[in-house]
Image (tube, rainbow, N blue to C red):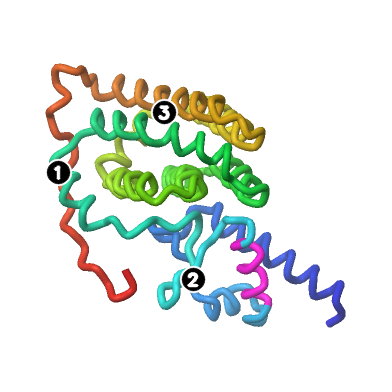
Amino acid sequence: MNEMSTNNASGQLRQRLLDLIKSGDLSADGRLPTERALAEKFNVGRRFVRQALDALETEGLVWRRQGKGTFAGQPADPMGNLAARITGQTNAFEVMEARLCIEPELAALCARRMRPEEIARLRTLTQRHQEAADAQAIELWDGAQHRLIAQCARNKPLLTAFSLLDEIRSNPDWVSLRSKSRTPASMQVSYNEHMAIVDAIAAGHEQAARLAMRDHLETRFAAIQRDLDITTDRSDEPVFVAAQPKPLTADE
């Protein structure tokens, strides 16, 4: 096979893998089938699978973990144990308050520190979120966007705080709350707000990025409040069920 044919084959396989990711047929954690299984599924050599996955990883659409496999989106930090203990003691009101304290500053730091190739990844993730066809895919790409911003702010203490909130947000009760408040109109609003965040970061405007992230989170907060009818007088009522802490593995 000549170089042009090889590039065409790799490009076609990359698109088929993208279609698989967008289909929503992956497991809840976004894990892709093994390279061997993908090679058999698409009737290609494993070398082509590896090349296509390399391309998707460069774009920030998948990530790999040694011994665990390849996953769609962006990796989460291993904060599961602590988050599981806190989940049963908090509520949506407190989580959104915490996000409003942390994530606007992460966006502002990204406007100062995010690299061009990372901004390109963020735009791609934002587009994938817009194209998502089901609740699971929406959650996957929404989390990936916010996670990439947190990582590219390059501030370890803030990333740790974000990671804790990110784990709490993965609780099924929290996911259900977000799903209930989501409509086609709200998805378009979220896309516009996400693009405003990306554009401010790309322009290097720290205050604009900070305000764009705050506006986005306040919009989502208002939607959740409408669904829950939460008031400050009831903000101490837990609305999450605590998950059992997961045992740490050797590589965590």
Q: Is residue 51 magenta?
A: yes
CB-based contact (under 8 Å), mark 3 and mark 2 = no
Crowd class of label 3 (few under 14; some 14 to 19; many from 20; radius 10 Å): many
Query: Cα distance, mark 3 to mark 2?
Result: 34 Å
Quadrant of the snapshot with the C terminus: bottom left
Residue drawn 41% across and 73% down? 68
Q: Which residues are magenta?
A: 48-57
Residue drawn 20% across and 34% down? 91
Crowd class of label 2 (few under 14; some 14 to 19; many from 20; radius 10 Å): some
* Residue corresponding to mark 1: 88
Quadrant for residue 10, please give it.
bottom right
CB-based contact (under 8 Å), mark 2 and mark 1 = no
Q: Amino acid at mark 1?
A: Gly
Query: Cα distance, mark 2 to mark 1?
Result: 33 Å
Secondary structure at numbered mark 2: loop
Secondary structure at numbered mark 1: loop
Residue sitting nearer the eye, 65 or 42: 65
Is 92 placed left or right of 19 in the picture?
Answer: left
Q: Earlier in the sequence, mark 3 or mark 2?
A: 2
Query: Cα distance, mark 1 to mark 3?
Result: 22 Å
Q: Amino acid at mark 3?
A: Leu
Q: Amino acid at mark 2?
A: Pro
* Residue corresponding to mark 3: 217
Q: Earlier in the sequence, mark 1 or mark 3?
A: 1
Secondary structure at numbered mark 3: helix
Is 243 placed left or right of 227 in the picture?
Answer: left
| Residue 105 spot, x, y in % from top left | 44, 34
* Residue corresponding to mark 2: 33
